[in-house]
Structure formats: C-alpha cells, structure tokens
Amino acid sequence: MSKRFKSLLTPIIAVLLGIIVGTIIMVVSGYNPVTAFTALWNGSFGDIYYIGEVVRQFTPYILAGLAVAFAFRVGLFNIGVEGQFLVGWLAAVWVGVAFDLPRIIHLPLAVLAAMVAGALWAFIPGLLKARFRVHEVIVTIMMNYVALHVSNYIIKNIITDNKDKTDLVKESATLRSDWLQSITDYSRLHWGIVIAIIGCFVMWFLLERTTRGFELRSVGFNQHAAHYAGMNVNKNIILSMVIAGGFAGLAGAMEGLGTFGYATVKGGFTGVGFDGIAVALLGGNTSLGVFFSAILFGALKVGALNMPLEAGVPNELVDIIIALIVFFVASSYIIRVFLDRISKKEVK
Amino acid sequence: MEYVIEMLNIRKEFNGFVANDNITLQLKKGEIHALLGENGAGKSTLMNVLFGLYQPEAGEIRVKGKPVKISDPNIANDLGIGMVHQHFMLVDTFTVTENIILGREITTAGSIDIKKAEKQVREISERYGLSVDPQAKISDISVGMQQRVEILKTLYRGAEILIFDEPTAVLTPQEIKELIQIMKTLIKEGKSIILITHKLKEIMEVSDRCTVIRKGKGIGTVTVSETNPNELASLMVGREVVFKTEKKEATPKEDVLEITDLTVKDTRGVSAVNGLNLSVKAGEIVGIAGIDGNGQSEFIEAITGLRKAESGSVKLNGKELINQTPRKITESGVGHIPQDRHKHGLVLNFPIGENMVLQTYNKRPFSKNGILNFKEIYKKAKSLISEYDVRTPSEYTLARALSGGNQQKAIIGREVDRNPDLLIAAQPTRGLDVGAIEFIHKRLIEQRDNGKAVLLVSFELDEIMNVSDRIAVIYEGKIVAIVNPKETTEQELGLLMAGSNRKEAGEHSNV
Ligand SMILES: Nc1ncnc2c1ncn2[C@@H]1O[C@H](COP(=O)(O)OP(=O)(O)OP(=O)(O)O)[C@@H](O)[C@H]1O
Ligand SMILES: [Mg+2]
C-alpha cells in the first residue's frame, strides 16, 4: 500500500467508523438507522434545493478549513478562526452598507475588507508568538471573545442605532444571485463558492510552488533548519497567521455578503470557525483535502435538518455522528497502525 | 560453538529498493561482533530487522538455534534482544529511573514503587560499572550518560544480546574509552554484543569477529585477530583506502576571517566564549582542537549567526559580520556544515532534492519572480547526489529515509558546491565510513587549494592532525595555543586541550 493511498484511506475509514458507531447509537436508542440515513441523504443531495444549500453551507467551511490548515502547515494551531471569521463578517457588511459604489468596485472592496479584518485579527497572535513566544492557542482563544463582543458593540452602537441587526448590504456589494437561486429551486446559493475554490488554489499554489511557500513549509517542519538556512522564522510565523486570518475573514464575507446579507448581534459563537478545525483535520491540512472534507461537513450539517422531519431523529444525534467522525480522525493514528498491519500481511 | 543469534540470508526491500540482499550474520555467545559497511550499506536496516522494527522479505532468524518470527520490538525484548539506537529514545523531563521502567513499572497495590525501582536500577548500574545516578533528570545529564541510560534500559528488560548502532559517533574520546570498558564488562557477565561502528580502530580493539556488508550484500565474516584495518577497509569499500590524506604544502594568503575578542554566552547565560582571537587565511585549513564543552559550539554558532554574540568583532574579507543574520553571513560567502545535522542541517520531511537548495531556493535558476522551478531544483540535486556519492533511491526520497552518513554527504555537497570563501566544517565526518571520510577530507583540501579558507572543528585528533595546516587549541572559550601539526604530537595537543600552557606541554611531550 503506498503512502498516498493510505493517507487517502485514513479519513474514509474514519468517516465509516463514525457512521457505524452512529448506527449503533441509533439502534440502541430506538431509531431506525436506515430511514435516518436515508433522510440524511435526501436532506443533502436528494433535491436540487438541498444541493444548493449544501454548497452554500460548505463555502465558508472551505475557507475556515483553509484558515486552520494554512497555519498548521507552518506549525501553528489557529484556534482563532471563529474570531477572525466574525470580524471579517462585520467588515464586509459594514463596507456593504456604508458605501454607494459601482458593483465592480463595491463587491471587491467589501470582500477585501473582510480579508484585511481577519488578517489583522490574526496578526496580533502571530506577532505575540513571534516576538514574545506567547502561545498562539491562548491568544487566539482570547481574541475570539474580543471579536464577538467588539463586533456586537459595533453593530449595536455604531452601524445601527441600538438595533440587533444591520440593514441588508447594498445590491452592489452582494454575492447573492437571482440566477443561482432560481436554478436551485430558491436555495440561498451565492457566488461565494467561486471565491472558496480560488482560495483552495491560492493555498496550494502559495505553499507548493512559491519561494515564500518553501520558507513557510520549512519553518513548519523545522524552525532551526529554517533559521540556519537564512530564513526569517518570525516573519514567516506572522505571515502565516495573517494569511490564515485572511482566509477566515473571507469565510465571514461568505455569510455577510452571501448567505445572510447582513450582520446580527450574536449571543455566542457561530461554530463555523471551530468546525473549520475539524474540516482541516479530516482533510489532512492540504487544500484539496480541505475541499472534500468541507463538502462532507456541509452535507452533514444541511442533511441533518431533514432527519427530525423525515425520520424523527433528533438533530443532536447528527452532532454526535459529526463528533464521532472527528474523534476517529483525531485517532487516525490507530487507523494508520491498523493499515500498516494489513499491508504487512499482504507482503507475506 | 553455539550461536545465540543467526540471521540467515536476510532480504529487506523498501518500495523495490533492496537495502539488504541475502545477508547472513551469526553471533556467538559472549562475543563482540562488529558490523561494518559503508554509509547506506544497510547496517541499521539489518539491525532493525533483528529488533522487529522491519519485517524481512526473505530469510530466517534463529535465536539459540530456534527459528523465530520477530514481528515487533516487544517480541525482541522477550527474546532477550536489546537495542541502543543512535538517536536516543528518552523522555527528557523524566528521571533516569522513570525512563528505565517506562512500560515495565513495578507496582505495589496499583501505585508505582519508585524506591524499589531505583534500587534495582542502582544494582544493575553498579554490576556493569555504569555509574548512573538513578535520580538524575535526563535533561541534566551528558550525552554519554544518556547513552548509558539506554544501555541500562535494555539490561533492565533482561537483554542477553545487545545491539549498539554507532554508539561512539556522539561520544568524546574519553567517553569512548569508558564505553569500551563497559562493553568488556558486559561480555564478562555473559552478554553478547553486535556493534556497528565506522571506526576501524575500535573494531580492532574490542571485537572478536567482524561481518562486512557492501551495498546491501553480505561480503563475509572475518576473525579480527587475523586481520588489519587496511584489509577491513578494502573489504568494505571494495578498493584500497588511503588513511593519510595526501596534500601539498599550503600557500596561505590574505586573512579571510578575523575574529577579535569574541565573547558569547551559552543557553544558560554563562559565558562560553571568553575573548577569543583567531584568524584564518585564504588557502589554509585551521583546525580547532579541544575537549567538548570548551565553547566550540557557541563559537561556531556565533560566527554563523545562529547565536547572539555579546561583544567582539568577526570580519570576513574585512567586512564586519558580527550579529548579522544567517542569510547575510551565508551570502557574504560563508558555508557551514553544522554539527547537528538533524537540528540545523536538514528539513527531514522534505525530499533530499529540496534540501539541496535550502539556502539558494530564492536564487536563479531555482526560482524566478518568487515561483519555484522544480525542474532546475531536481536537476541540481541529481548532479550533487552523483558528485558527492549520496546513496539514495532517488532525489525525491525524503531526507528522513536516508542513512545517517548519506544525510551528511548531502549537506557537505550543498555547502561546498556554493564555493564559499570560508567553509566552516563542524564535525564533518561524524558517522561517516572511511571511504567517505577520505572523500570529505579531499574536498576540504581541494577548497583550500582553490584559495578558500577552511575552519575545521573536530573532536577527532587524527582528523585535526591530518587535515589542518594550523591547529588552534581551544580551552575554556579561548584559543590558548596555535601549533603546527607537523611539529606537535598527540600528547602535546592533549595536554594543551586540558589547559596546561605551551611550555609545560612542550616539556611533557619531550619526556
Ligand atoms: N524507511 C526507508 N525507506 C526507504 N529507504 C530506506 C529506508 N530506510 C533505509 N533506507 C535506505 O536503505 C539503505 C540502507 O540504509 P541504512 O540506514 O541501513 O544504512 P547504514 O548502513 O546504517 O548507513 P549509515 O552508516 O550511514 O548509518 C539506504 O540507502 C537508505 O536510503
Ligand atoms: Mg545507520
């Protein structure tokens, strides 16, 4: 068994194990797993409307996954995607409602604002890590809370007059498309998917094909060797956080300019940023892997909504299945050992 | 005589690359059996097969005459086989005892009985003359001591057969002497030993028989008392090997490197280099001789930009370079073969090809406008690999999968190829076979003859005496003497390295 094949098989087995254990749990708690999984499938791919919704759902997942994966490749654990995502969302909507510009300028400007906001938010933990060796996990978690409360404040007191919700972004800044909606039976599908796919390509190209990526990967694998080779380790640490934050900010723009078209005061985290960690983990921190695992998570999330309706299974059970998949991915070491055993047997 | 271990016609492949091809090794009870072969010949692979880390594709292993299947290291342990790896596998923050009992804890009523374990560890340590403190923390003890902890670990698990993979490569000459003593004690206590080493002197000194492998094939087993280093070397390489490198008289020209009053602190903040002065001229090799821990590492790290210097001046061709970045220093014309190849020299998870351009990836033709040109990178890598005889399945193989010696050759190729004005070589031949050492020494001398300056740091006095044109002795962070290798002796050097002054040392060596 080649290495490549094994690294492909590992997440697939993790997903299967998640489904198997999920089945057992359903049987034990008295639900019919066949109808439940049929409902899950129907609710994600059974209808063009659902397909549109799935795509809409996995668009920010891709970008959030990239935000985790990119930092991880440089050896950093970006737990702050949620915060970077929230400030990106806010910035996009702010630019979207505050200006009146031609579409060709307005939309890119709003998207850019989201990216810059996310990048700046991630710059702080990057800087603290590079300058003072403060662990990025602690700082990014803290920055998540700051992002949540600061953006709530800005929405309530600066963009609106003590309201919980901003206006819709201007036509000229929206990612929504009547055409995309009409061909998917009026789902909320929007143009953001194009940005997400470009994001995947950019991450791959940047890391694998450029001299900058060569440095980032070197720092990720061995900081000492990178330093010896004349690379600026601190600069690359900061840069990786900034780029990761940019991806997270873009994920926010997907919601602010696409799915919702506005920003609201939130009582708690959306979870998109944290799901991004699972997406990156399942995708093996490569851009192609992130793309496919985001599709899976998006489908589970959207399909889950159909399970209570069609099969009477509570929504929470789907969360449990997702959690199980994440669990098995995290313990992929065990799966890999198992695969090694099998391939050894083959040789004999 | 009965064999405790027999490895018969072993074959091991990695994705079609044959690392062991029909190798036979038979270990008698109570002998030290040396395993000799060039870098990448397949020694570590063969031992990993015996220790259950790899499964052979063909061949048979017998322990005390009985055929066995060793499918993982636990089975090897149960069969009484223990291995001291070249890269230690110890938990830094644990004590010696904790490391030793890891996985074999003695418990009374469910909790670890550390006192009892310590007592056992102390007993074993005394019995074999290891003098290890069971309560010391791993991070606080020297490399030599850590190695003894590894030995203790195998003994604690009841090993009868001990495998040592290049144990002396990381040790100072004094530690080597002590290790040899320990091995002799082990034999006296009834153990049997397989010893991998590239140092023929050590084989001649301690081992009874020696099995030679060449490019994955078994060449045969010889009785050490009936052979000599020259024969061993030519068996291993397949041709005659010259031990003393031929070289012309040096023709030193202008100063390339001038160091004045350099002071550097070590990681704990204690002064390690104390006002060091040294110059290296174009067209000469200056060797730094000294006992480990006299500031050599800090000195090299400071002049290559890896560590901050406190004060002083480091000039290259008249240009001040103190506390510049490694990139600036590299680009001013310094090549550096680092002492620790895994920490600094290589990105182990990169293909060997990408490691070949670790400093030059941002230059043409390897990249243009920030975009890498993999065709050029791998073309370069391919030519360096063949020029420096790096044995690797291909240039796309991860650096991690190369044998230790071949990783070193790759680094040397990369550094020499940049043709730097000053080449700094720290322990360049550590872990290399005699053929490769000869090759490296020739390269260093070639650099010199091309009018470049070479600074060589080594714990091997032979190497220092052989290759250098001037020897600078370092003691407590200062250069205490400069001697001419032709006019000095190992004794005089030894005394200077231990801190006695020039005059005394000279008198002693005359006696
Ligand atoms: N895991 C692996 N995958 C692919 N090739 C490998 C692997 N391990 C070893 N090799 C190859 O097998 C050959 C033998 O390697 P091995 O480590 O046994 O050499 P060695 O004799 O111990 O050399 P050295 O003296 O340099 O340590 C080398 O060419 C190496 O590149
Ligand atoms: Mg080896």
Image (cartoon, rainbow, N blue to C red):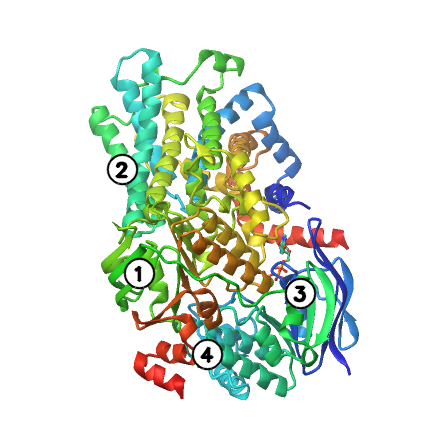
The chain letter under disc 3 is B
Q: Which residue is mark 3?
A: B236
Q: Position of residue A248 (x, y in %)?
A: 38, 34
Which disc, if any, is residue A149?
Answer: 2
Looking at the rendered structure, the kind of residue marked 3 is Met
Q: Residue A290 vs residue B135: left or right?
A: right
Residue under the point 60% across and 27% down: A42
- Split into 4 quadrants, where in the image is the N terminus of chain B? bottom right
User: Which image quadrant is residue A108 in?
Assistant: top left
Looking at the image, do the residues carrying marks 2 and 3 touch, with CB atoms under 8 Å apart? Answer: no
Q: Name the front one of labels 4 and 3.
A: 3
Quarter of the image with the C terminus of chain B is: bottom left
Circle 1: residue type: Ser
How far, Cα to Cα, is label 2 from label 4?
A: 64 Å
**Quadrant where ligand 2 appears:** bottom right
Is the residue indicated by label 3 positioned so its CB lies within 8 Å of ligand 1?
Answer: no
Q: Position of residue A255 (x, y in %)?
A: 39, 26
Determine the chain carrying the residue at label 1: B
The residue positioned 36% from the left and 55% from the top of the image is B282
Question: Do tags 4 and 1 sit on the same chain?
Answer: yes
- Secondary structure at badge 3 equals helix
Residue position marked by numbered label 4 in the rendering: B174
- Mark whose residue sits in front, 4 or 1: 1
Residue occupied by mark 1: B279
Residue type highlighted by circle 4: Gln
Who comes first in sequence, dot 3 or dot 1? 3
